[in-house]
């Protein structure tokens, strides 16, 4: 599952893979360092922390985009790239025609 998520360009575009990986490593190391301290607290607090983190992860997952939304974003991104390319071509043609007139 982990490897598949990183291979899918819709989930992690190439330009964000390193940043996403480093953020995950930073968060996991921070949680690993804090875990023994939380475990030494009074009895109900460790369980409350675990339950809170579980609910937080569920809420975060709800904000992930599904496959159809990712495909729509990809289509829009491709359309924007095509528009910018066509505008660049038009500017080149305009500049080329001005050079010929002079």
Image: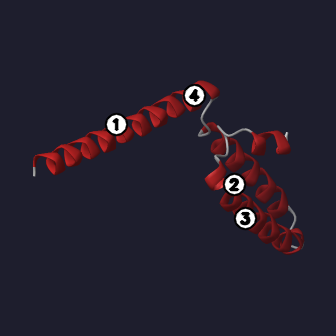
Per the model, the C-alpha gap separating discs 4 and 3 is 26 Å
In the picture, measured across the screen, residue 59 lies left or right of residue 75, that is: right
For marks 1 and 3 on the same chain, the one whose residue lies earlier in the sequence: 3
x and y percentages locating residue 87 in the rendered image: 30, 40
Q: Secondary structure at mark 4?
A: helix
Q: Secondary structure at mark 1?
A: helix
x and y percentages locating residue 38 in the rendered image: 83, 70
Per the model, the C-alpha gap separating discs 1 and 3 is 37 Å
Give the position of the N terminus as an image quadrant.
Answer: top right
In this rendering, the label closer to the viewer, 1 or 2: 1
| Tag 4 residue | 71
Per the model, the C-alpha gap separating discs 1 and 2 is 29 Å
| Tag 2 residue | 17
In the picture, measured across the screen, residue 1 lies left or right of residue 68, that is: right
| Tag 1 residue | 86
**Residue name at image x 67 percent, y 40 percent:** 11
Residues at circles 4 and 3 in contact by the CB criterion of under 8 Å: no
Answer whether residue 41 is visible to the viewer in this image: no
On screen, residue 46 above or below 80: below
Q: Secondary structure at mark 3?
A: helix
For marks 4 and 1 on the same chain, the one whose residue lies earlier in the sequence: 4
| Tag 3 residue | 22
Dot label at residue 4 = none
In this rendering, the label closer to the viewer, 4 or 1: 1
In this rendering, the label closer to the viewer, 1 or 3: 1
For marks 1 and 2 on the same chain, the one whose residue lies earlier in the sequence: 2
For marks 2 and 3 on the same chain, the one whose residue lies earlier in the sequence: 2
């Amino acid at each position: 599952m982990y490897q598949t998520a990183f291979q899918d360009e819709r989930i992690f575009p190439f330009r964000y893979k390193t940043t996403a990986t480093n953020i995950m490593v930073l968060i996991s190391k921070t949680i690993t360092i804090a875990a023994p301290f939380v475990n030494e607290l009074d009895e109900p607090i460790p369980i409350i922390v675990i339950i809170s983190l579980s609910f937080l992860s569920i809420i975060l997952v709800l904000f992930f985009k599904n496959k159809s939304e990712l495909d729509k974003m990809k289509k829009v991104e491709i359309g924007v790239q095509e528009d910018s390319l066509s505008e660049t071509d038009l500017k080149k043609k305009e500049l080329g025609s001005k050079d010929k007139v002079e």
